[in-house]
Image (cartoon, helix red, strand yellow):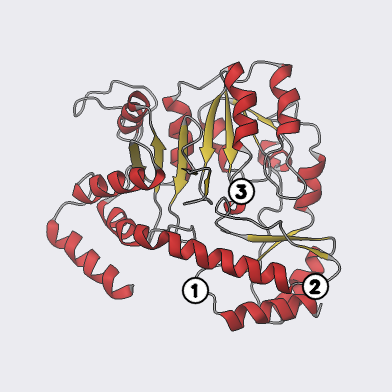
Amino acid sequence: MAEVLDATARRVIAGGWYVLGPELDGFEREFAAYCGLAHAVGVASGSDALELALRALGLGPGAVVVTVANAGFYATAAILAVGATPRYVDVAAETGLLDPAALGPLLAAGPVAALIVPHLYGRLAPMAEILALCRPRRVAVIEDCAQAHGAQRDGRRAGAFGAVGCFSFYPTKNLGALGDGGALVTDDPALAGRLRALRQYGWGDKYHVELPGGRNSRLDEMQAAFLRVGLPALDGWNRRRRAIADRYRAGLRHPRVVCPPPGGADDVAHLFVLRCAGRDALAAHLAARGIGCAVHYPVPDHRQPGWRDADAGAGTLPVTERRAAEILSLPCYPELEDDEVAAVIDAVNAW
């Protein structure tokens, strides 16, 4: 892969076109086709994708946007950036995904303009139930697909369920660039047109601003070219991630450790997140054995000091808060060798 990437970089440099050129055009076509949609719009990051999705849908001050509080604050940052108001919904204890049973009462309580639903840790959220709640109320559904490239259910991939899907290509993602990058996917040509304008200052014609809220957010030619190299390998990488997750589930036997439930094609195992009441002690034990681990994510959005007043109605989210104190991510990436997986399993069981 290193040799292919090196050759790709040399080709882009020799071509002399570095922004909004043929590599981006090619990647957008290929990624849209992979997702089963008509349009993909490359942008500078997954965070920009979320913000531009909100702007393209006309959301700003006065709009209420619902999301979860356990997915790493990216959605909240986008909501606040456009001047909208976040409202938080609790999650399912077993998966950490948005809980439709908690969403229904929140939607019924007052006007909601949009929902940002993350496919957390690589597993598709329960989209059928979520859409059944949102569509009758005309709540726009934005999918946060930053951890779920290639996940699919009933023949539809992540990003193809709601109005628009938002992706990150940060290097650690299932499909990663060699720097920052992002994209939005949609079947709506008018929405795609607004997104393309907003990623470049809101221009229609060059130097003519036609839409407010635009910015400089473009996926550059080099990163687009690297992503074109990786895209054909994505499904294979996802299979390896699933195999590692399955080995963990089969091998982890510690009585205080709870593994995530098994997944199929709707789970691309971006992260393998277990639960443990003694999480910090387990993390210290693994670190002492030279095994990396992390918490995704330690502080729910409604408990972040800088956003304490962002959602005055948040109150407590009991499942979200309980999970934040228990979750721990084990190594899970395609290059992980079988003997390394076995070493992680042995270390956890020996705790």
Q: Is residue 101 above or below residue 2?
A: above
Instruction: Name which quarter of the figure residue 135 lies in.
Output: top right
Would residue 64 appear left or right of 170 to someone viewing this image? right
Q: Position of residue 158 (x, y in %)?
A: 50, 44
Q: Position of residue 186 (x, y in %)?
A: 40, 34
- Judge by depth and name the residue closer to the eye, 38 or 98: 38
Name which of mark 1 and mark 2 comes first in the sequence: 2
Instruction: Read off the residue under disc 3.
Output: 120
Instruction: Report if residue 76 is visible in the image.
Output: no
Amino acid type at circle 3 is Leu
Instruction: Read off the residue under disc 1.
Output: 335
Q: Residue at x 72, y 25 (%)?
A: 104
- Judge by depth and name the residue closer to the eye, 293 or 186: 186
Q: Name, please, the residue furthest toward the front.
A: 154
Do the residues under discs 1 and 2 have CB atoms within 8 angstroms? no
Using a 10 Å C-alpha cutoff, classify the residue at mark 3 as few (fewer than 14 neighbours), some (14 to 19) or many (20 or more).
many
Would residue 156 appear left or right of 300 to someone viewing this image? left
